[in-house]
Amino acid sequence: MNTSPAADFARRLFEESGLTSSHEPIDVMLVSIFLEKHYGLNGRLGRLATEKDDTFRLRTDTSDHLVKVSPPDEAEAVVDLQTAAMRFLESAAPQLPIQRVKLTADGRDSVAIRLSDGRTRILRVFEFVAGPVMAHTSPDDEQLAKAGEMLARVDEALMAFTHPADRRGLVWDIRHFHQLTGLLEYTPNPEHRRMAETVFRHFDTAVVPRLSDLETQVIHGDFSPYNIVVDPNSDHFVTGVIDFGDTVRSAVIFDPAVPMANLLGTTPEHPWRDACAFVAGYQRERPIQDAELPLLPIAALARLTLRALITNWRAERAPERREYILDHAKDDWINVERSLAVRLDDVVAHLREANPGHS
């Protein structure tokens, strides 16, 4: 990126998000030593693909756990924010299927690993939530609505949560979308650039003037189909909510916008159908303010476009995670195109019809 003020802001945002540097995968034996010393856990560690943490599934003789080691460039306060949000929900809303944090033998949430180069990485252990993630199932409209209801309950429970690091800089936070136009220079396909510019215009016109007065609180930040564990045979459908890595204080409507973005285009003939089904469920539990509802489809498009723009940028700078990054965003431009082909006014009208409380 160039050296303009906007580019400098974007660079800082990427740095604060832990996306600007790559690191060597942490040694599995070192992780095993810390698990035995601080948690009394022994077992088989299997590495899992994730965006930036080193993540493992630990299988013991009696139970399974998820083990995360933060990247060395992620601030300890940000890691603590993520853990604190999970612990808060466990206490404030124990009925919600939030992934549980396992404490160390002496009652701590995490353990610091000091590297030889002076940097620190934070090791945490969570319960392993068994079952498929929603992305690997084919939910019907009511199951999508059940997922929407769950996010609304999470948001309701998080209303009272605060943390010193909750105003962190996060590139995935949709409120910064309009400040990331510099990513266009990493998009060589002219049609992709044209679509992105259209989404930026929508966002600049409708959302930016409203940013300062949108309802705001700490949100999950990444309630994607990959972070929702489900049981298709259960009436509850959602059996686990995982990965609080993007927890941040932001506009509430940006929380449902994330799963909407992931659901856009999944039914090509009706690209907004699944996204609207999700929001219908969300609004059964927590109605979106009437003045904010028209911004929701634009926010969803912004999130999807942002992921498409970041994909190649990230893949170039983190070759060890290239396959994971590209796989998660392989259809983004196709889905942006499909979604833009539908009038946004029609999408908003559909969202209003699905909630009788709206006039």
Image (cartoon, helix red, strand yellow):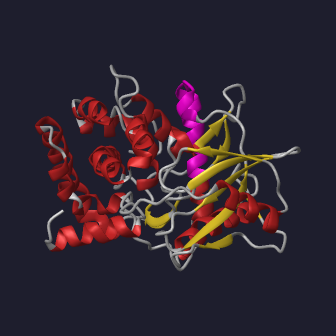
Q: Image quadrant for the C terminus?
A: top left
Residue 216: percent from left, percent from top:
44, 67
Query: Looking at the image, is 317 positioned above or below residue 281?
Result: below
Residue 326: x percent and y percent?
Answer: 37, 39
Residue 260 appears in the figure = yes
Residue 122 percent coordinates (x, y):
61, 68
Q: Is residue 148 magenta?
A: yes
Relative depth, front residue between 24 and 66: 24
Please state if 301 lies on the left or on the right of 166 as rendered: left
Image coordinates for residue 226, horizontal then vertical, percent: 54, 40
Quarter holding the N terminus is: bottom left
Of all residues, the one furthest to the right in this rendering is 62
Lateral position of residue 262 relative to residue 151, left or right: left
How many marks the image carries: the answer is 0
Taking the view exactly as shown, the residue that stands out farthest to the top is 269
At 35% across and 63% down in the image, what residue appears? 20
**Range of the magenta residues?**
134-153
User: In the rendered view, does 27 fall on the left or right side of 343?
Assistant: right
Residue 322 drawn above or below residue 174: above
* Residue 341 image-quadrant placement: top left
Q: Main secondary structure of the magenta part?
A: helix
Q: Residue drawn at (69%, 31%), measured in percent from left and top?
A: 231
